[in-house]
Amino acid sequence: MNNKKELRIGLIGCGLMGRTHSNGYKRIGDFFPELEYRPVLKAVCSRSRDKVQAFADQWGYESVETDWKAVISRDDIDAVDICTPNDTHAEIAIAAAAAGKMILCEKPLARTLAEAKSMVDAIDKAGVPNTVWYNYRRIPAVTLAKEIIDSGKLGRIFHYRSNFLQDWTINADLPQGGEALWRLDVDSAGSGVTGDLLAHCIDMAMWMNGGIKDVSAVTETFIKERMHQLTGKVQKVGIDDACIFHCHFDNGSLGVFESTRYARGHKALYTFEINGEHASIRWDLHDMNHMEYFDHSDDSIVRGWRSILVTDSDQPYMKRWWIPGTSIGYEHSFVHQVADFLKSLETGEPCSPTFKDALETQKVCQAVLDSAASRSWKDTEVNWPATNMNNS
């Protein structure tokens, strides 16, 4: 360990994503020992000193700050990890880039397309390594699906469909805003399920199937007014509770996407299915270690969907973990993204999705919201791929 290069992390935000990222940094030395870089948990920042100190004590950060600007100004910080609500992503990232820091940013990249573009401009000017935490790409079954698609086994692609369903906001008395419920406040979040959930689906779809060319969308806000926790006043709800859109991909295939927080009985139902000329693939987060595959070239008497357990050492990432047949979990996707980022520092290649990649996802999100508002088709102006990297 003494000959490792240190990557001194400054984590801003200590909520759920702060925990998942911290776990990722802490596991790298155990399971990716050959990497040249070793994350050092140098500082963590949150506005509440009691909260951030408790987080630092639990996760092993060397110091705490209560102002993110102090983290960026420190000479002993190499990489800034942004785990804050969406309304602060742009300001923090632009300042971090100007200070020459590497940047790892939670998704979505920003609240709006304009903010996202300003972040990409800052990254381009500074030339600093960067990535965005679209972690579901790093689930081994998903990465395997990507490899199969890239191999051409599916042939011409006809359809891509995906959904992300939750039910946690089905309560008219639930307030908006504040620390726990900022995702319901449009000023903090930028959008509702479009930026929070569909962004994952869109990133995955374009990574798997290429650029999305145009969209036609419908959104709905079921509860029109909620009390705001910070003001105590009843205010209009500005975020989308549900969104459905269909689209054309650059390769001529059709896409259908749905996301909602009003699907009773679903906590995090995230699925995708891709149908090709010769074969099809589907995946479900609830059964994340399996990938389902249908191959029409199989003999007719045995032709059907097969469920492939992705735990063997020759499958993506799995040689790092246990024995065949034993599963890994959600948290491992963050370990894999840390590993890919550290490896990219060795090779000098981008770690996708980069800010430029995430900007293309933001373009689709913006087109979806604009389409729903105008009740018309909208071009996305996506330029895909933004970077030519496929981490696995």
Image (cartoon, grey):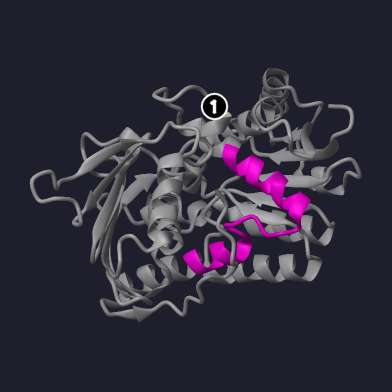
- Residue 356: image location, x then y, percent: 60, 67
Q: Which residues are magenta?
A: 336-361
Query: Taking 195 as reference, is 264 above or below it?
Result: above
Can you give x and y, in whole percent of width and height, for residue 134 in the image?
Answer: 52, 50
Residue 345 painted magenta: yes
* Residue under the image location 25 percent in, 55 percent down: 280
Q: Which quadrant holds the N terminus?
A: top right
Q: Residue at 74% of width from left, 22% of height from top?
A: 60
Compared across the picture, whether 108 is left or right of 93 comes to left
Q: How many marks?
A: 1
Can you say whether 276 is above or below 378 in the image?
A: above
Residue furthest to the right in view is: 75
Q: Can residue 63 be seen in this snapshot?
A: yes
Q: Which residue is mark 1?
A: 321
- Residue 202 is left or right of residue 49, and the answer is left
Does residue 229 appear to the left or right of 238 in the view shown? right
* Residue 284 at x, y percent in the picture: 30, 41
Disc 1 residue type (three-letter): Trp
Q: Residue at x 39, y 35 (%)?
A: 310
- Dominant SS of magenta comes to helix
Is 357 magenta? The answer is: yes
